Amino acid sequence: MPLGANSRSLGIWNGVIEKCERRLVNWKSQYLSLGGRLTLINSVLDSMPSYMMSLFPIPDGRNFLWEGNSETKKFHLVKWAALIGNKQVGGLEVRNLKTQNQCLLMKWLWRLASNEQALWKEVIQAKYEMEDHWSTSMVTNTYGTSLWRTIRNLWPKLRGNCKIKIGNGVKVSFWEDSWLEQGPLKTLFPDVFILNQQQRATVAEVWSNQGWNLSFRRPFNDWEIQRVVEFYRTLEQFRGGNTVQDCLEWKDHKQGRFSVKGAYKKFNPFNTQINGWPWKMIWKAKIPYKVSCFTWLLAKQAVLTQENLMKRGIQLSPRCFLCGEKTETVTHLFLHCRITNQLWDLFINKKELKWVMPRRVTQTLKIWSSYANISGHRKRWKIIPACIWWSTWKERNLRCHQNKSNTIQKMKMNCLVLFHFWCKQEYMEDLESVMNVLGSL
């Protein structure tokens, strides 16, 4: 643990970086697929020391997923926001270290607001005046306080997701805290609050066994009586006499306990649901993980076809490498190319489907999944789109990078052999021949 170091300095993370590099030293990451690098990233992030992250703000970085350890700069195919969401909402579930870091720092605020006794709490309370009974005041000094200022700045975010469980009322502000179901009394009855002489009092200070001891600046006017009656009726839901200490409760936990895991799920900003995102067809299909990642890129329209390369400033011919007739876009190459269509026909004609090719990859996955009910083997049926697309991409790259090509008959056979291999590997069945697999659909 670095002592006396600037909490925002990158140098304090050198030890963590060295540990990560030791884990990566035996991996030729520039040769790994996207799926391999993704697996490696999650493995390393899960093993990172959380102690450092619970004390210091962590810097951002995202190059490794796209570039590995290669010195050559490579394209970042999709936005970072698309990577750190859950797979159900279109992400890759790469851990959002910034959110994880904030949730770990929030744990200090939660412990400060709790009733535990600790020396560090006494030090913090002595150095920074308490704003209320739950947290310190905002840190305004610029020298020697950056660490606690970073932590304290997260208090509004934490406090907004907590509720007060009132006990003896010693810590709870009578007017400003939400200790009643309806909300703060200051907000519910601003006209009564203005007239009160105990605006900073706690619940314990205005409550006794005989009832509420509230004093006001003047007698109430006739038109104010009804509001005062409503005010006291609202207070009737409080039952005094409790000797248990007040505490905060986390709203999203049944027992009210704060956890870093629960806070991460709550605060990760990239879990917005994408309507109709076919995540099960991408991640639940029994195919190699690298192919699932490739299918995900297809669904994001992010595979580096000629069109996408030209968008990134690469000067080249836009023609499709398979048919040589139209611009090589994602939708053309994988859905509408006359060469690719012959691979689709292998499976569509077998089931005599009335099929019209959709315009987008995501639509294709959703519609193809809906046809799984007519197949004798639902799981095998769901493999087919990825099998066609992977075979198409391999043939395209063969023509692009090696200046070689297969006949359409050879492409069909390669696709069927790949389909047969995946079925045999995943379901461990005695499949005598490629055609037997096709016939079993």
Image (cartoon, rainbow, N blue to C red):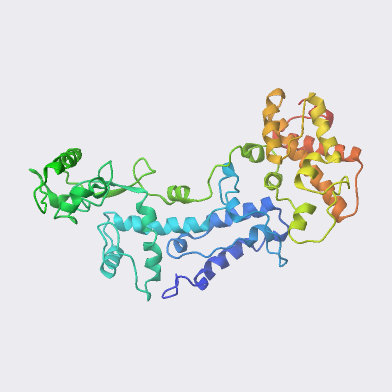
User: Residue 132 sits in which quadrant?
Assistant: bottom left
**Position of residue 212 in the picture relative to residue 161 (left or right):** left
In the rendered view, would you say 382 is above or below 208? above
Which residue does the image show at 20% across and 39% down from the upper left? 234
Q: Is residue 169 visible?
A: no
Q: Nearer the viewer, residue 339 or 43?
A: 339
Q: Is residue 233 visible?
A: yes
Q: Residue 360: image x %, image y %?
A: 71, 40
In the rendered view, would you say 401 is above or below 343? below
Q: Residue 117: image x %, image y %?
A: 26, 58
**Position of residue 319 in the picture relative to residue 274 (left or right):** right
Q: Nearer the viewer, residue 35 or 341?
A: 341
Which residue does the image show at 74% across and 37% down from the upper left? 385
Q: Specify the quadrant that holds the N terminus.
A: bottom left
Q: Nearer the viewer, residue 187 or 259?
A: 187
**Position of residue 78 in the picture relative to residue 408 (left or right):** left
Q: How many numbered discs?
A: 0
Q: Residue 214: image x %, image y %?
A: 11, 49
Q: Residue 38: image x %, image y %?
A: 63, 53
Q: Specify the quadrant that holds the C terminus.
A: top right
